[in-house]
Amino acid sequence: MAVAVVSLVLIAGGLIALQRLDPGGSPRGEPAADLAAGSVLQLRQDSPGSPVRSLEVPLGAGSSAVPLQRSAAGAVSSEMSTTRFSMLGLTWRGRGTPVIVVRTHRIGGGWSGWRRAPEMEDRPAHEGDPSLRATDAMWVGASDGVRVRVKKGRAKQLQLTLIDPGTLPSDRTATPERRSTRPTRAPEPHLYSRKAWGADPTWRNGTGRYIRKIRQVHIHHTATPNNYAPEDVPALLRGMYRYHTKTLGWFDIAYNFLIDRFGRIWVGRSGGATKPVRGAHTLGFNHESVGVAVIGRFGRQAPPRQAIRAIVRLAAWKLDAYGGHPRGTVVVRSQGSDRYPTGTRVRLPVIDGHRDTNETSCPGQRLYNLLPEIRRRAAKRVHRYDP
């Protein structure tokens, strides 16, 4: 009986699966962690014409997996050399909450320190595989090396996703769509379309859904450093979109809208920016709300005033279209979250933070502290335009 063998390459003190071979030496399939050029993990184009390249790398046991070496500090991979990437994420299965840390090698620089990969807390109830656990998609900047360590706990079927969103000429020249309609309610703010950030429509899984009425605005943040440049934002959205759809199997990018630190509002999930599109942003509370993510981390650093102004304008527009009151409260029946079991009736602010519905620190304390101001300003804007 023919027995498959594994060709291995030594890289930085560890063994990496190069390519499975049949007894005759020819390639057998195309393993996820294929090392096609020496000892460098090669990211591959996601679809014809797309600038996005990615690679799924199994970690741990298995013939095509990168081994994890056990030590007193946890289970750690070798230093993996790669082609260019700037975003990564990890998925696994099993109970418990493992502590996973990563370090990356910057192109033209050195290795970063170890950084914790935060477990994803924004997820849908009816999209993808509910047994799949994941970290947030982490923006790490232009890199060509990575190392992973499971510092605490265990993660079965651990897999690393590397994403290079690539570049498009429009990344530096994106402009918002402009509408000439005269507002009778709070006006629509300037929006940057999905086309402006290069969303590939072929990546969507299944069919989008709509809700009856928008009663809430949930505010989030992302696992993204706060020092990104304007031209980084479209690429960042492409990477997040790829991770949500192809790695996690969701229908589309989770958030209805995303706001960058420059105050630009980007349309996230497809289905029509003016319509009540159901997002995948707040487990248990997606059915009567719109999800808005501010790109950055705001636990210690306050969000820029431009971003706050954008939240105010976006929230006023979406709520006023359905007669919502930004400073009010509503009673919402949970569809099941880690904080409120299915069927629980919860009174919540109309504009709330993710932590109000789920066990999370999102959207960060410094942004959460500004929600009263956001509610007040959004209400003032609604009152200004209402007849």
Image: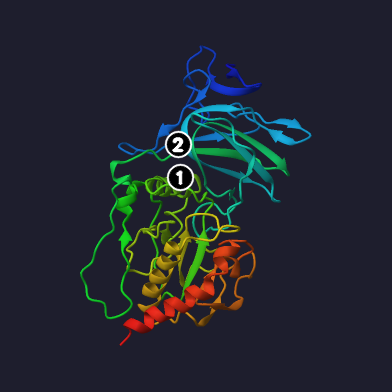
Residue 264 image position (x, y, % from top left): 37, 59
Regarding mark 2 in the picture, which secondary structure is present there?
strand
Q: Residue furthest bottom?
A: 387
Residue 280 position in % (x across, y down):
48, 60
On screen, residue 241 above or below 265: above
Q: Is residue 163 left or right of residue 76?
A: left
Say whether marks 1 and 2 touch (CB < 8 Å).
yes
List x then y, in percent, for residue 290: 44, 68
Considering only order in the chain, which callout, 2 or 1, is on the residue closer to the N terminus? 2
* Residue at (62% x, 61% y) in the render: 361
The correct choice, above or below, for 193 with respect to 89 in the image is below
Farthest top residue?
A: 24
Secondary structure beneath dot 1 equals helix
Q: Amino acid at mark 1?
A: Lys
Residue 284 visible in the picture:
no
Residue at image position (42%, 62%) is 306
Q: Which mark is residue 246?
A: 1
Residue 20 drawn at (x, y percent): 54, 21
Indicate whether 97 appears above or below 370.
Answer: above
Residue 22 visible: yes
Quarter that holds the C terminus: bottom left
- Give the number of the mark in front: 1 or 2: 2
Viewer-side residue, 259 vs 226 = 226
Amino acid at circle 2: Ser
What label sits on residue 258 in the rendered view?
A: none
Residue bearing mark 2 = 54
- The residue drawn where x is 59% and y is 18% is 8
Distance in Å between CA atoms under marks 1 and 2: 10 Å
